[in-house]
Image (cartoon, helix red, strand yellow):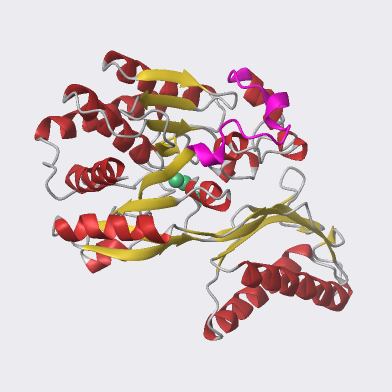
Amino acid sequence: MGSLPSFDAGYAGIASALFDQVRALSRDGPGVTRASYGDVETRVLARLARTAAAEGIATSYDAAGNLWMTVPGRAPERPGVIAGSHADSVPRGGNYDGLAGIVAGLVCAIRMCRERAPPERTFTTVAFRGEESAWFGKPYLGSAALLGKLTDRDLALKHRDTGYPLRFYMREAGADPQRLVRGEPLVEPRSIAAYLELHIEQGPVLEDADRPIGIVTGIRGNFRHRAIRCIGTAGHSGAVPKRMRQDAVFAVADLLSRIEEAWDEWLLNGHDLVVTSGVLHTNADTHAPSIIPGEVWFSLEARSGSQETLDGFHRAIAAECESIGAARGVRFEFDQPIFSAPATMDGALVELLAGICAERKLAYMRVPSGAGHDAAHFANAGVPAAMVFVRNQRGSHNPDESMLIEDFMLGTDVLYAAVRAI
Ligand code: GLV
Ligand code: MN
Ligand code: MN
């Protein structure tokens, strides 16, 4: 492992050029937008496929529309190694969330081809579609489909902007939605020796600790409501005394502040928990400052490394809604929640990655992942999975997200050494 020479500077140039090309394809104001199963995502995959093909790497698309870029191994009969991540982004997000992992895998594959150094096991870089829940409410769509975990109900999930179902967008993108919901994996999990994903950290921990590399121990699961509806009574803002109002905005404000208090308590009790409400609005088309708000919609998401914590907190929120409903004369209508299970990374792969970092005298640390990743699906399907985090600046899921190419190449080096060692 340690005896492998690091990437020479030319590969950093290849990576930078790929990042720039994809940014140019997906630029949206200050950030990038690559909608899940959208046109830009399709064009990004085509761009990556062209680069791979020019280097002699075999490319193909699976029935979920994910792009496979494969370097055959010297022992093709043995289970292969997959490096993957996602090509989509949140609306006006950053360029590296997801893309970094695909570019890292592709750069490793290019090096294998240029140096005529095929790996022992067949090595495939998969560019997944549809990882971001921002578009259809559910994350990991491309990897879920690959592993036979997509359901008919998932195909009916509505696009955030158009309301058209996922099924429609999948077909437009050349995928075969009917085949995907048969519950049969497109690839047999036993045929995958390891799933490795490089990803930017998206949080401040590595930067704060001054370490360029993180090795992920586990991935938080979550539950998510895209739109809970609070129903009160609309009325004249001047004419109704306080005690006679059923104001939906104050009810939701009360609920959210109770949720935040409960969150503090759960943290004090040792739970791993983060909670977010972001999409929050009244019936804005007809609403006005002179109307008591009769309806509010709000999103609610909680994440934890523990399924028990997620289930318990979900029940606690339902109880708060009951109690606020009774006290304020409002009603909460819940949409169908979307659940993603927490995942644990493979112990042996974590040790392998740690050994590689130690041999290379890289400053690294083990970290749990607060964000969700396709790796969670592989781990929960029984595929040994592990992740390399690369330090990044100014967070993620925002247009200011950034990353140093030097740090990226350190992570890519770790990924390459791991692929060769497995
Ligand atoms: C994926 O980016 C997530 O929302 O965790
Ligand atoms: Mn993301
Ligand atoms: Mn991501």
Q: Residue at x 50, y 47 (%)?
A: 383
Pick the residue in front: 189 or 152: 189
List x then y, in percent, for residue 165. Answer: 72, 31
Is residue 346 in view from this perspective?
yes
Is residue 28 in view from this perspective?
no
List x then y, in percent, for residue 10. Answer: 12, 30
Q: Residue at x 75, y 48 (%)?
A: 283
Q: Is residue 323 above or below residue 61?
A: below
**Does residue 395 appear left or right of residue 290 in this picture?**
left
List x then y, in percent, for residue 113. Answer: 23, 23
Q: Residue at x 38, y 58 (%)?
A: 348
Q: In which quadrant of the rendered image does the C terminus lie? A: top left
| Res 135 → quadrant | top right
**Which residues, given as a range, are shown in magenta?**
172-191
Q: Is residue 314 above or below residue 29?
A: below
Q: Does the magenta run of residues contain 231? A: no
| Res 311 → quadrant | bottom right
**Does residue 412 appear left or right of residue 68 in this picture?**
left
Q: Does the magenta run of residues contain 178? A: yes
Q: Residue at x 55, y 26 (%)?
A: 38
Main secondary structure found in the magenta portion: loop
**Does residue 110 appear left or right of residue 220 in this picture?**
left
| Res 20 → quadrant | top left
List x then y, in percent, for residue 57. Answer: 32, 19
Pick the residue in front: 129 or 121: 121
**Does residue 222 appear left or right of residue 326 in this picture?**
left
Count of marks placed on residues? 0
